[in-house]
Amino acid sequence: MRPLDDLSIPQVFLIGLVVVGLLALAFAGSTSSQAFGTFNAAWDGSSGVRTAAAETEAPVEVATETTAYDSAGSETVALVLAPTESYSRAELVRIRTFVERGGTVIIAEDVGDGGNRLLSALGADMRFDGRIVADQRHHGPTVDMPLATNVSDSPYTRDVDAIMLNRGTVLTNTTSATVAVRTSEFAYLDGDDDGEVDDNETLQTFPVVGAEPVSEGTVIAVSDPSVFINAMQSRASNAAFFTNVIGDADRILLDYSHAGSQPPVRAALLWLQRTPLALSGLGIIGVVLVTYLARTGLPTRSWYGNDEQQSVDEDSLFAYVRQEHPEWDETRAQSIIRSLVSDETSHEDEDSSVR
């Protein structure tokens, strides 16, 4: 190895580029641009929800496999945002078993059908309508960002005045559920998505948050996953609503097992966390490497002024000189070696003073 002072400007520049490149790769490999992604810090990601969950006393797990439900207890709350991939029959049985033994699953969906398939498999009656809900009077920047102002008294609505949707839908078949939040009476289902109330579109109140008991557990349906994205957590009482729905959980499970791929670095770390054998193997490799370096030693640098190393170099040089010039006596050989070492040291001092 060489000290930084011995590096030329192009070499320093090259090292800087390599370091910046590695940092950029690490950042790209640990972040995501996927909508609703828990590692997406942009407006459409849900990294804020993960951060808010981490501020509670409960451990937070980002699940990329449904096997995480196997060890989840009855006080665990799982959050599923707009699943884009279908659950297999075995996976659905695993999640339903979790609910039946007392767990809580929050399913947030709007226009997709993944949420309805999951609700059906879990034994809930609620469904997502799929049409965009709008409100002509109570809304945010646009009419399709309605303020759901009819808030019922429930554990999920403490300190919640209203929640704001962003092109969400509404719930149907809520007879068996407790509806916690509804739209105002000026809401309508905009079937043709033209932003206007047509003759076949009626103003009325619609349920948007419902909690339905299933066996010993609870299924909570939220008719818009955008309620949980970063840009919407600061709207209305959306942040307080999320805090309430995770409640006093002893474990929080963010289920991204069917929400597309995760960033490679994050995926690798999550795999290591749920694979103790691989984590142990990595630790063993680290111990072996450290032990090897400790036994063999790192390369020493004679230009740091290490007297011991310099002595070793002189001995080696002396042996070489006596071998190459047997006609020289010991005194002459040592004299020449000392002059060479002294000359090298003086050149290094001169270079150092110039730098």
Image (cartoon, rainbow, N blue to C red):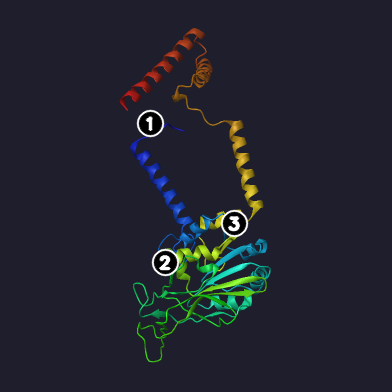
Disc 3 secondary structure class: helix
Amino acid carrying label 1: it is Asp
* Horizontal and vertical percent position of residue 100: 67, 71
Q: Is residue 211 left or right of residue 191?
A: right
Q: In the displayed image of the protein, which residue is found farthest to the front?
A: 153
Using the image, tell me which numbered label, if any, was put on residue 271. 3
Above or below: residue 203 compared with residue 88: below
Using the image, tell me which numbered label, if any, was put on residue 191. none
Mark 2, Cα crowd under 10 Å, few <14 / some 14-19 / many 20+, is many
Q: Is residue 89 left or right of residue 316?
A: right
Q: Quadrant of residue 283?
A: top right
* Horizontal and vertical percent position of residue 290: 59, 37
Above or below: residue 354 compared with residue 187: above
Among numbered discs 3 and 2, the one appearing first in the sequence: 2
Real-space Cα separation, disc 2 to disc 1, in angstroms: 51 Å
Front-lying residue, 157 or 68: 157
Q: Residue shown at 32%/23% (left/top)?
A: 353
- Whether pointer 2 and pointer 1 mark residues with C-beta atoms closer than 8 Å, the reply is no
* Horizontal and vertical percent position of residue 42: 41, 61
Real-space Cα separation, disc 1 to disc 3, in angstroms: 42 Å
Q: Which residue is mark 1?
A: 5
Q: Residue shown at 38%/92% (left/top)?
A: 199
Using the image, tell me which numbered label, if any, was put on residue 232. 2
Amino acid carrying label 2: it is Met
Amino acid carrying label 3: it is Trp
Front-lying residue, 300 or 219: 219
Can residue 263 be seen by looking at this rendering?
no
Q: Nearer the viewer, mark 1 or mark 3?
A: 3
